[in-house]
Image (cartoon, helix red, strand yellow):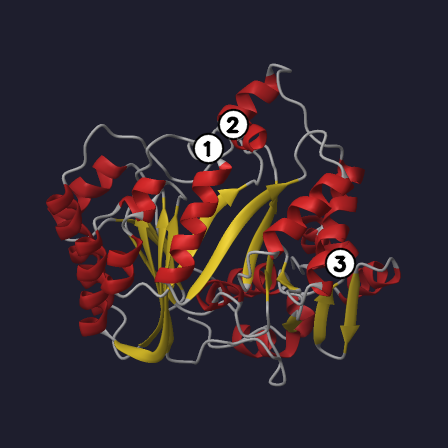
């Protein structure tokens, strides 16, 4: 796996070390499927908790054997709804990880949670298991929008869970979804002001998108669902960044905002294109130049682990060009940008082999990119066009 960091040495953001490792554990089950969600999540009447704990531990042990002599900087329990996991299972996985690898003294252990009263009741036990950071899917601060988004909680329950989380965990983040149909600047500013008043040091703010295969996509295709027009969405994006910057939680990535030092270390490993292991259904990893993927359907993954001792469906050796492209894709999401020379050294392609200088100059002239020597950043305006920018600047041959 490449050891470069897209950030230059004077960057303020935390960055993974050359021997660092992030661990992702996927819990695929939810109480219900949200209509906008395209994650690998499934609703089941019952879950054999012992079988799942043992399978996750086996999948973890298999991956650990292939990644020796690493220092674990973060663990992230994602889903699905990992706050539905028994705290004993969370504790068993953290304990196993600590035996497979050395842990950083300041390791970050995050768990995603829905803000229901049932799940909030587990927060103290999850903290005792070793979780020190929680990410709450609050999503909105008015009941009408929560119903539209298919969320099971209301505002009162969500804020009660937030209070509980802030007592139980060292670090708390929560998500909000904006750019909703008919949402205006005034209403979003008021909602964001209220969100900031709760005092968390990290907020993930996502624009509502219609993802293929979701209930929202089916309703949109039938003309039953409206979306916010792109100009208004862009205005809300710029407004969000300004309001968060003024509040002392600037954007450090397209959708993530934090007080300096409170950024998500686990996600920074992805965006720095560091090494990470993924276990559980549908989990992805990057190991020694290999892109790993586990089987997605829970029952298929469980069967694969029973048969083979792991849930891997595919392992693909990525060519240097593909790895350089991934480093650009991930690193340019960061406001700090990428070091093209570092990526070029690792890929052995040369800067001219990974980016088109003419395209960079052209897009810089349009105010979408800034290049200073070998350091490349996407401007605030360019962030909304990142996919199109990447298609323009990546050198294809």
- Tell me how far mark 3 sits from mark 1, CA to CA: 28 Å
Q: Which residue is mark 2?
A: 147
Write the residue at 41% across / 44% down. 115
Q: Secondary structure at mark 1?
A: loop
Q: Are marks 2 and 1 in contact (CB under 8 Å)?
A: yes
> Relative to the observer, which residue lies in front, 131 or 214?
131
**Which quadrant, please, contains the C terminus?**
bottom right
Outermost residue toward the bottom in this view: 10
Q: Is residue 94 visible?
A: yes
- Report the side of 29 relative to 253 (left or right): left
Q: Which residue is mark 3?
A: 242
What x and y, as percent, mark residue 382? 76, 55
Q: Secondary structure at mark 3?
A: helix
Q: Is residue 27 visible?
A: no
Residue 389 figure quarter? bottom right
Q: Which residue is mark 1?
A: 151
What x and y, as percent, mark residue 41? 36, 37
* Mark 3 / mark 1, whichever is N-terminal: 1
Q: Secondary structure at mark 2?
A: helix
Write the residue at 68% across / 39% down. 179
> Relative to the observer, which residue lies in front, 133 or 169?
169
């Amino acid at each position: 796996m490449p050891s470069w960091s897209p950030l230059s040495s004077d960057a303020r953001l935390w960055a993974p070390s050359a021997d660092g490792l992030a661990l992702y554990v996927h819990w695929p089950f939810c109480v219900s499927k949200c209509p906008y969600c395209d994650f690998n999540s499934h609703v089941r009447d019952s879950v054999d908790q012992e079988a799942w704990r043992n399978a996750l531990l086996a999948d973890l042990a298999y991956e650990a054997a292939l990644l020796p002599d690493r220092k674990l900087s973060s663990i992230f329990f994602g889903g699905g709804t990992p706050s539905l996991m028994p705290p004993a299972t969370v504790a068993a996985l953290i304990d196993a990880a600590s035996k497979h690898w050395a842990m950083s003294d300041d390791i970050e252990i995050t768990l995603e949670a829905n803000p229901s009263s049932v799940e909030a009741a587990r927060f103290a036990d999850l903290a005792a298991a070793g979780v020190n950071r929680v990410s709450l899917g609050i999503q909105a601060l008015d009941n009408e929008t929560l119903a539209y988004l298919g969320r099971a909680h209301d505002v009162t329950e969500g804020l009660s869970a937030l209070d509980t989380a802030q007592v139980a965990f060292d670090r708390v983040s929560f998500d909000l979804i904006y750019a909703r149909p008919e949402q205006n600047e005034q209403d979003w500013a008021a909602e964001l002001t209220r969100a900031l008043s709760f005092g968390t040091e990290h907020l993930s703010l996502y624009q509502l998108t219609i993802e293929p295969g979701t209930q929202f996509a089916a309703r949109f295709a039938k003309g039953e669902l409206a979306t916010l027009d792109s100009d208004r969405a862009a205005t809300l994006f710029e407004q969000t960044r300004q309001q968060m910057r003024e509040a002392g939680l600037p954007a450090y990535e397209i959708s993530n905002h934090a007080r300096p030092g409170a950024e998500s270390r686990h996600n920074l490993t992805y965006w720095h294109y560091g090494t990470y292991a993924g276990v559980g259904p549908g989990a992805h990893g990057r190991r020694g130049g290999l892109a790993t993927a586990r089987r997605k359907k829970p029952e298929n993954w469980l069967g694969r682990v029973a048969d083979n001792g792991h849930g891997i469906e595919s392992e693909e050796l990525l060519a240097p060009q593909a790895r350089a492209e991934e480093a650009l894709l991930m690193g340019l999401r960061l406001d700090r940008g990428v070091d093209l020379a570092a990526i070029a050294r690792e890929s052995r392609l040369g800067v001219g082999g990974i980016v088109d200088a003419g395209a960079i100059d052209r897009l810089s002239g349009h105010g979408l990119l800034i290049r200073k020597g070998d350091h490349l950043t996407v401007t605030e305006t360019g962030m909304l066009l990142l996919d199109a920018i990447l298609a323009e600047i990546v050198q294809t041959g």
